[in-house]
């Protein structure tokens, strides 16, 4: 299994951009990078995913390094509702691990008003 | 609206009792999953099922059992053999093999069931 490293916590002020880093140095060529977030006492929520090129959706942007050993989730303007734990998850689309996503401890994002 | 429904939201159990947590989805997803989350921890995979009548153990299956008799349902039983069952339990589903190769196997989660052993 590829290992991921994320900071335990990060802070931001409201309406400022937030860059959440993730290192996944052992990722293989076919693994996608998925990001989920979890608000307190709720189930995780899908944010974004990508393979090689940068991706954008209504929630966030995902910047993937050229060597794919790291990625950054970008929240362009943080709101109080973005305060959550963010998980970076390599997705192993092969064999018996098909669809089996592993969640670690993630990054706790605090947003200050 | 399509989604996943978990019940009950809160459950209290006496030691030595089995309890069953319900998980129903109307997303027409093939794959379903059960995770356990302890305070301040990430999610750990208990069981998963890629198709009806088939399921696989995850990382912490001991003391748990599941069934997958219908596509939309994946109940989890926490047995008396589970030594420390107090936790937050999350059910999820995904397209499974329909998303193979596209990276589109996005998981949709339920709101969770919080089990407390008295």
Image (tube, coloured by chain):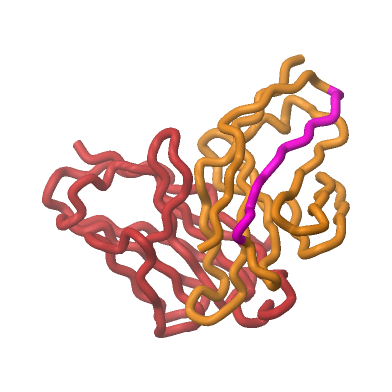
Q: B10 left or right of A68?
A: left
For chain A, the rendered hue is orange
Q: Magenta stretch?
A: A15-26
B95 displayed left or right of B10? right
Q: Quadrant of residue B38?
A: top left
Q: Nearer the viewer, residue B40 or A26?
A: A26
The single residue placed furthest to the top in the displayed view is: A113
- Image location (x, y in percent) of residue B3: 62, 60
Residue A24 on the magenta segment:
yes
Where is residue A51 shown, x and y percent of the image? 77, 64
In the depicted view, which residue is nearer to us: A36 or A41?
Answer: A36
Is B30 left, or right, of B75 in this rendering? right
Identity of the residue drawn at 43% across and 56% down: B35
Image x and y of residue A32, in percent: 70, 64
- Check the picture and name the quadrant holding the C terminus of chain A: top right
Number of numbered discs present? Answer: 0
Asked if residue B7 lies left or right of residue A54, the reply is left
Residue farthest left in this picture: B16
A19 in magenta: yes
Residue at image point 56% right, 32% down: A8
Residue B50: where, in percent of width, then height?
50, 78
Vertical order, A6 against A102 (above or below): above
Residue shown at 64%/43% (left/top)? A37
Chain coloured red in this rendering: B
Q: Residue at x 23, y 45 (%)?
A: B84
């Amino acid at each position: 299994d590829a290992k991921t490293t994320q900071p335990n916590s990060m802070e931001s002020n409201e309406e400022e951009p937030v860059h959440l880093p993730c290192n996944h140095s052992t990722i293989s060529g076919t693994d996608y990078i998925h990001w989920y977030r979890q608000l307190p006492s709720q189930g995780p929520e899908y944010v974004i995913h990508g393979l090689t090129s940068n991706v954008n959706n209504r929630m966030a942007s995902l910047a993937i390094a050229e060597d794919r050993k790291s990625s950054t989730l970008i929240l362009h303007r943080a709101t109080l509702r973005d305060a959550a734990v963010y998980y970076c998850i390599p997705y192993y689309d092969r064999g018996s691990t098909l669809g089996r996503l592993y969640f670690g401890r993630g990054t706790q994002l605090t947003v200050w008003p | 609206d399509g989604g996943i429904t978990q019940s009950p939201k809160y459950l209290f159990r006496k030691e030595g009792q089995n309890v069953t947590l319900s998980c129903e989805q109307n997303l027409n997803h093939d794959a379903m999953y059960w995770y356990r989350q302890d305070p301040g921890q990430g999610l750990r995979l208990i069981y998963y099922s890629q198709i009806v009548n088939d399921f696989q153990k995850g990382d912490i299956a001991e003391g748990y059992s599941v069934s997958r008799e219908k596509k939309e349902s994946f109940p989890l039983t926490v047995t008396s053999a589970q030594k420390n069952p107090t936790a937050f339990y999350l059910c999820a589903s995904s397209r499974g093999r329909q998303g193979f190769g596209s990276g589109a196997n996005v998981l949709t989660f339920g709101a969770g069931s919080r089990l407390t052993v008295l």
